[in-house]
């Protein structure tokens, strides 16, 4: 097992796998008939923006990037992150390495350096793509993306990209990867602006706004392809049991 792990973590193998995954995703993009909602989404926003996604959707999110848009994506420093960074490079997206720490030493996770790198990217006109939720806490927006918007002055745009034919994994983040020869939907949400002077109460309210908007665009994207979001939160009624 250790030998297999060393082989799969080797640079040559990861380069090959990253290239193959990127090539496959390009094929999925070409062979699905995509619709965008709203149709004039890019006329409504001014680049650069912070594109927000839920964990598990990172395979598909780059489909919503136009060829002319420069983009950077936050990628963890883990071995899996290295593989993702290579795939992103082949898809025309620059990787910024680092992640939040959830109470652990943030310096080891590279969170501070990553925040500075994302601020530089936005200041230089690059769109920044990042997950709004943190590892192992699916579909709950963290403070990191809100802080980035506050410090940079750039809006958060929730994004969902799904296909009618796909594989849904039974993972903590309910990850999905598209399959060829189907229909696809890209839904962009309402931009969320975070004022520099926002206090703690306002930041919490805006965090909840981002969370609700991400849930909404995912629900709508799956609806457009005639499906249901496998990672959707249970409704309050279902969580509380049937009502008499």
Image (cartoon, grey):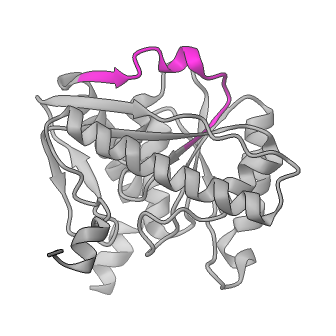
The residue furthest right is: 197
Residue positioned 22% across, 71% down in the render: 238
Asked if residue 37 is among those painted magenta in the image, a careful observer would answer: yes
Viewer-side residue, 37 vs 10:
37
Range drawn in magenta: 34-51
Q: Is residue 226 rendered to the left or right of residue 239?
A: left
Q: Position of residue 10 (x, y in %)?
A: 42, 65
Query: Residue shown at 86%/47% (left/top)?
Result: 196
Residue 46: x %, y % from top left = 66, 22
- Residue shown at the point (28%, 77%) measured from the top left: 4
Residue 123 image offset from top left, x and y in percent = 80, 35
46 lies above or below 59 = above
Can you give x and y, in whole percent of width and height, for residue 207 in the image?
Answer: 62, 58
- Location of residue 30 (image quadrant): top left
Determine if residue 86 is in view. no
Q: Nearer the viewer, residue 195 or 125?
A: 195
Q: Left or right: 22 with respect to 78?
A: left
């Amino acid at each position: 097992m250790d030998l297999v792990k060393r082989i799969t973590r080797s640079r040559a193998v990861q380069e090959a796998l990253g290239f193959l995954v990127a090539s496959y995703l390009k094929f999925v993009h070409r062979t699905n008939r995509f619709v965008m909602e709203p149709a004039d989404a890019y006329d409504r926003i001014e680049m650069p923006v912070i594109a927000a996604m839920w964990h598990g959707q990172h395979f598909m999110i780059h489909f919503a990037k136009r060829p002319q848009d420069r983009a950077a994506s936050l990628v963890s420093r883990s071995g899996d992150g290295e593989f993702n960074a290579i795939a992103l490079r082949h898809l025309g997206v620059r990787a910024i390495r680092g992640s939040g720490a959830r109470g652990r030493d943030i310096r080891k996770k590279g969170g501070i350096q990553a925040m500075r790198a994302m601020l530089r990217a936005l200041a230089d006109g690059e769109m920044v793509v990042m997950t709004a939720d943190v590892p192992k806490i699916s579909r709950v927006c963290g403070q990191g993306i809100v802080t980035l918007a506050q410090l940079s002055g750039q809006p958060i745009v929730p994004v969902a990209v799904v296909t009618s034919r796909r594989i849904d994994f039974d993972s903590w983040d309910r990850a999905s990867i598209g399959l060829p020869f189907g229909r696809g939907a890209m839904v962009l949400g309402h931009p969320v602006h975070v004022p520099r002077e926002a206090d703690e109460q306002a930041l919490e309210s805006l965090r909840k706004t981002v969370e609700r908007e991400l849930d909404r665009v995912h629900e709508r994207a799956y609806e457009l392809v005639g499906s249901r979001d496998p990672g959707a939160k249970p409704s309050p009624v279902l969580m509380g049991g049937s009502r008499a």
